[in-house]
Image (spheres, grey):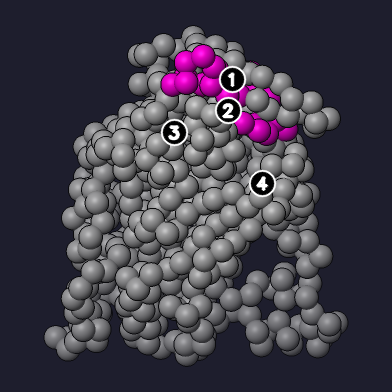
């Protein structure tokens, strides 16, 4: 088995198959990062001279890309190439998709998935155990569960306690957030100690990162080759089978890794790029692309938010992750908000995306950031800190894009990477439905903030939104080979020995952070491969 990519999907597949006794090699484009260097990375991350990209070595010719379409897409803002992938950088929220996401039952025109929630439910539980998820069964809108979370949920933050009564008066239910970080010692990793720098780096290791399962896979016998970007996949005499993955080492030498089966787990951008780079006389449009769907239906989650100041302490930036949220408007985004029988936000008709509401613990500047950026000293600096810190509060939220064929990943031959390959070009637009939904999320957020007595100072709305760095949909799953890239088991329709474990197979985006679903699909893919091998 050859696995391309050492992020969460690749790491879990490799560990599952190596543990079952199979011969596994993992090819990872980026380097290994020394865990003991994380405190230094944290220190660099809070200094103005460094940005988040430099903490994990992103940028430069290796990571070039281009953008097209209506909107600029900041691809490198939140991704990491290296052993562990973007879980080295992520925030760590891990909700399950709702059954309505799979069934296509939202009030819109999205298709359903070829698998249902019940089929994935046991793998969700396994994924929560593998990653180490702290949570509670207090979400009345969440999907059904049979097993408890591995760890108890984090207590609501101080600012969450400010939001709770305002939400209650508006009939909005708040509940805990499932987090892939330790609320107690778990899996030989420490309890969260509150560094507050979850993005871009967790120095303690309490937040899950996929290098954990890479190491487990290696202990089970897998071989991991880092700094080995795969240049192309080659078929042999049988055009329906990949014969080898051709990868390059840092000195530029190319090597061929042969295998019986191949799993592509390099994310929603690099997977379609690799398939398109692998075109040949037998596959003139790229591998696994007889449908023309490779690279198409690129989806994102867009941010909706609002915040300001309040005339009391909020303890802002004391917690670097979310502890409370609300899924009340997920399956019914058009429902009204009322207070004492009076309508505050009217009901809305028409197609809307699901809305996931979040209560931000890291609103406003931190005193460290303010001090490091300041041009004053001594008492003047102290006065500035006291005047500008401590009373900020904010809400956020995610709104998923519908699948649109024009949103796609292609190759840009005018720009090449450090090995001379065309870089990915991202064609991205938002669409009317997602903009309507963001506007609605903003109205709900404004209602809550106003009820709390906040002087609203900013809004991230339809005209000023941005992506959550959740790359989905570019090798979609389906039963029709003419309209999809992989089948419900995640094997490509066109190739008998190529599997894709990634959010790129999502037919729809929902509005939930995708990593737990990625992990569940990867574990399911591992079981399928184990049976076939």
Residue appearing at x 80%, y 31% in the figure? 252
Q: Where is residue 487 in the image (x, y as percent from the top left)?
A: 32, 32
Crowding near the residue tagged with mark 3, few <14, some 14–19, many ≥20 C-alpha atoms within 10 Å: many
Crowding near the residue tagged with mark 4, few <14, some 14–19, many ≥20 C-alpha atoms within 10 Å: many
Residue 290, quarter of the rendered image: top left
Q: Position of residue 17 (x, y in %)?
A: 47, 18
Asked if the magenta segment contains residue 140, the reply would be: no
Q: Which label's residue is closer to the chain start, 4 or 1? A: 1
Residue appearing at x 43%, y 37% in the figure? 289
User: Is residue 107 shown above or below 223?
Assistant: below
Crowding near the residue tagged with mark 2, few <14, some 14–19, many ≥20 C-alpha atoms within 10 Å: many
Q: Which label's residue is closer to the chain start, 4 or 3? A: 3
Q: Give the range drawn in magenta.
A: 223-245
Tag 3 secondary structure? loop
Q: Where is residue 341 in the image (x, y as percent from the top left)?
A: 14, 86
Q: Which mark is residue 422?
A: 4
């Amino acid at each position: 088995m050859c696995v391309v990519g050492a992020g969460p999907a690749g790491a879990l597949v490799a560990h599952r198959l190596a543990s079952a006794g199979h011969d596994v090699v993992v090819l990872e484009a980026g380097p290994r990062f020394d865990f003991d260097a994380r405190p230094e990375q944290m220190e660099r991350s809070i200094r103005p001279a460094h940005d988040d990209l430099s903490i994990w070595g992103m940028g430069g010719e290796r990571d070039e890309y281009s953008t097209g379409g209506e909107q600029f897409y900041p691809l490198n803002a939140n991704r990491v190439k290296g052993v562990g992938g973007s879980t080295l950088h992520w925030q760590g929220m891990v909700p399950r998709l709702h059954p309505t996401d799979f069934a296509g039952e939202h009030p819109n025109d999205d298709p359903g998935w070829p698998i249902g929630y019940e089929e994935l439910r046991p793998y969700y539980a396994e994924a929560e155990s593998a990653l180490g998820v702290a949570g509670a069964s207090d979400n009345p809108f969440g999907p059904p569960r049979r097993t408890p979370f591995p760890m108890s949920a984090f207590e609501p933050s101080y600012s969450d306690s400010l939001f709770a009564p305002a939400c209650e008066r508006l009939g909005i239910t708040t509940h805990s957030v499932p987090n892939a970080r330790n609320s107690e010692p778990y899996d030989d990793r420490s309890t969260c100690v509150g560094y507050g720098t979850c993005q871009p780096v967790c120095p303690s290791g309490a937040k899950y990162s996929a290098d954990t399962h890479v190491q487990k896979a290696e202990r089970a016998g897998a071989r991991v080759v880092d700094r080995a970007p795969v240049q192309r996949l080659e078929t042999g005499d049988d055009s329906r089978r990949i014969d080898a993955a051709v990868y390059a080492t840092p000195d530029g030498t190319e090597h061929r890794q042969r295998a019986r089966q191949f799993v592509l787990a390099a994310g929603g951008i690099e997977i379609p790029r690799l398939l398109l780079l692998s075109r040949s006389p037998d596959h003139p449009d790229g591998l696994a692309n007889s449908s023309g769907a490779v690279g198409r239906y690129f989806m994102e989650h867009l941010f909706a938010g609002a915040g300001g100041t309040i005339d009391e302490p909020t303890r802002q930036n004391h917690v670097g992750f979310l502890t409370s949220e609300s899924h009340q408007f997920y399956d019914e985004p058009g429902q009204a908000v009322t207070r004492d029988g009076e309508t505050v936000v009217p009901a809305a008709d028409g197609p809307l995306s699901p809305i996931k509401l979040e209560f931000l613990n890291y609103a406003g500047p931190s005193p460290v950031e303010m001090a490091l950026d300041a041009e004053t000293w001594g008492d003047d600096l102290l006065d500035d800190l006291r005047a500008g810190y401590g009373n900020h509060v904010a809400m956020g939220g995610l709104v998923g894009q519908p699948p649109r064929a024009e949103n796609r990943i292609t190759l840009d031959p005018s720009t090449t990477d450090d090995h001379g390959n065309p870089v990915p070009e991202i064609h991205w637009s938002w669409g009317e439905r997602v903009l309507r939904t963001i506007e609605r999320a903003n109205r709900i957020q404004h209602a809550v903030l106003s009820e709390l007595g906040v002087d609203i100072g900013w809004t991230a709305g339809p005209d000023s939104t941005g992506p959550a760095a959740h790359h989905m949909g570019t090798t979609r799953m389906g039963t029709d080979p003419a309209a999809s890239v992989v089948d419900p088991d995640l094997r490509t329709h066109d190739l008998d020995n190529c599997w894709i474990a990634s959010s790129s197979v999502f037919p729809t985006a929902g509005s939930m952070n995708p990593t737990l679903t990625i992990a569940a699909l990867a574990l399911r893919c591992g079981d399928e491969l184990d049976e076939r091998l």
